[in-house]
Image (cartoon, rainbow, N blue to C red):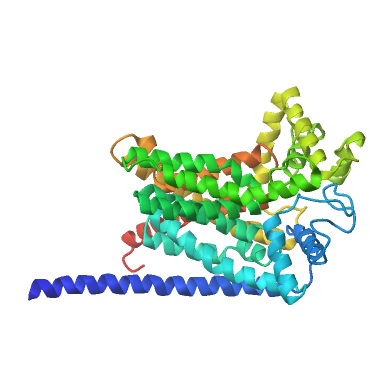
């Protein structure tokens, strides 16, 4: 009877531990939602230009035009160089439809989509961050990561904005988590289920910001490498399903763009503008996140003979010219790209930023950065201590996927256009490493001081 009692006690302990984790996660999730609701109420039922979230004015205006029957157009000349009444594909169709759907059903009250967004993102992003950290390290690290995500000022601030960032970051995290599931769970049924889930996550992410398309091949390659290394069978079915669903998500908007512009536009018309403006010779070898007034305006940089083109034609022409800047002076392009590093990873206060921006920057990324660096070093060290090929151990681990995303996504923006808000998805993916660093330091302090 004694062994049975002992086994029962262990099982009971494990059960209590699971319940304890769930309770903590619920508390953290509720706190995350409440903080984001506060941000939504602070930003209110009006849409104004605020630090870092000025794009919400465009999304609100575009959604109102959609429900008024004008389609994806603006009533006046609009950023970047879209003429009044002319079609635009510069902005996320999915997010615009999210706003237009709520406006159409309940009236054009911006507070409602703010609140709904805060609830969805507050709960889901916190939980998925926990799961990513748990799969990469442990439950304890996962709880710390969920807590960091819940109280991360940048995420709180942006969750109340009418912009793609909150849903986009959450969708990226979901994509990474599902990829880990596919890599670890072979079998036809599992590949079908998670392949569909991954395709849906890919589709949503890409419709929010098309730049994620550039990372999809790397993510799928990671899944294949893990499955091959562990001899779990090739993920052909899941890959086919996920890529097929991405096409299904994008294709309707490609046809829609073709009907409006009379030319092929895969999804959005913003890559050409970004690459042209981000690599223009006017910078020399020093990039500015926001073009200073002394250098004129972004519109001033567009050649006069191109300004009467429609948005799609202009975007494609600017991409060609942006690439030509690189071919004409590759050395300058390399130096300019390197100068984007401090702009992208800025965590210190600056005179050119307002109070909210400076506080958010220092108390978010600036606060976790030392722990992120420590956690990254610790994670790499642990992978190298395992038997076998050290590099492959690192690359094929869940933590390796998080590192891969941070590296590739950062590189994409360093080669094109860098802003702090473009870095936020990287922040979200690096949080598990900050949690690992905090957990390890706490355990070390505890061993030295048993009273801690």
Q: Is residue 49 visible?
A: no
Q: With respect to residue 28, does 282 lie above or below?
A: above
Name the image quarter holding residue 18.
bottom left
Q: Is residue 311 visible?
A: yes
Residue closer to the observer: 100 or 176: 100
Q: Position of residue 354 (x, y in %)?
A: 76, 59
Residue name at image x 58 percent, y 43 percent: 409
Residue name at image x 59 percent, y 75 percent: 34
Q: Position of residue 273 (x, y in %)?
A: 77, 41
Residue 352 located left or right of residue 434: right
Q: Position of residue 424 (x, y in %)?
A: 61, 53
Residue name at image x 88 percent, y 36 percent: 306
Residue name at image x 21 percent, y 70 percent: 10
Residue closer to the observer: 294 or 116: 116
Name the image quarter holding residue 448.
bottom left
Q: With respect to residue 364, does 211 lie above or below?
A: above
Name the image quarter holding residue 168.
bottom right
Q: Position of residue 357 (x, y in %)?
A: 71, 59
Residue 436 located left or right of residue 174: left
């Amino acid at each position: 009877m004694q062994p049975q009692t002992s086994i029962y006690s262990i099982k009971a302990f494990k059960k209590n531990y699971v319940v304890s984790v769930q309770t903590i996660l619920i508390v953290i999730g509720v706190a995350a939602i409440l903080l984001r609701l506060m941000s939504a109420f602070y930003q209110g039922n009006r849409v104004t230009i605020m630090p870092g979230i000025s794009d919400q004015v465009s999304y609100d205006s575009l959604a109102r035009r959609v429900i008024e029957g004008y389609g994806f157009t603006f009533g006046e000349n609009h950023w970047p160089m879209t003429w009044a009444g002319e079609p635009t594909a510069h902005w996320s169709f999915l997010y615009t439809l999210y706003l237009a759907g709520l406006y159409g059903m309940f009236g054009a009250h911006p507070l409602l989509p703010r609140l709904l967004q805060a609830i969805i993102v507050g709960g889901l992003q916190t939980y998925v961050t926990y799961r990513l950290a748990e799969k990469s390290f442990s439950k304890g690290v996962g709880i710390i990561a969920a807590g960091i995500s819940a109280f991360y000022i940048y995420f709180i601030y942006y969750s109340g904005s009418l912009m793609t960032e909150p849903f986009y970051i959450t969708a990226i995290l979901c994509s990474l988590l599902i990829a880990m599931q596919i890599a670890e769970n072979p079998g036809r049924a599992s590949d079908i289920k998670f392949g569909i889930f991954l395709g849906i996550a890919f589709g949503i992410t890409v419709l929010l910001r098309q730049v994620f398309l550039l990372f999809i091949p790397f993510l799928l390659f990671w899944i294949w490498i893990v499955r091959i290394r562990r001899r779990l069978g090739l993920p052909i079915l899941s890959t086919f399903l996920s890529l097929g669903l991405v096409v299904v998500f994008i294709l309707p908007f490609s046809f829609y763009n073709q009907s409006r512009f009379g030319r092929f536009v895969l999804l959005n018309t913003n890559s050409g503008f970004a690459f042209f403006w981000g690599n223009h010779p006017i910078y020399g070898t020093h990039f500015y996140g926001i073009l200073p007034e002394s250098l004129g305006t972004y519109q001033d940089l567009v050649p006069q003979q191109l300004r009467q083109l429609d948005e799609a034609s202009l975007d494609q022409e600017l991409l060609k010219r942006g690439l030509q800047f690189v071919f004409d002076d590759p050395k300058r392009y390399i130096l300019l790209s390197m100068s984007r590093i401090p702009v992208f990873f800025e965590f210190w206060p600056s005179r050119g930023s307002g109070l909210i921006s400076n506080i958010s920057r220092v108390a978010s990324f600036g606060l976790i950065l030392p722990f992120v660096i420590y956690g990254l070093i610790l994670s790499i060290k642990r992978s190298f201590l395992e038997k076998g090929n050290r590099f492959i151990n690192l690359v094929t681990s869940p933590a390796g996927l998080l590192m891969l995303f941070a590296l590739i996504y950062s590189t994409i923006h360093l080669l094109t256009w860098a802003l702090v808000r473009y870095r936020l998805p990287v922040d979200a993916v690096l949080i598990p490493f900050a949690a690992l660093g905090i957990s390890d330091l706490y355990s070390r302090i505890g061993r030295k001081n048993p009273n801690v």
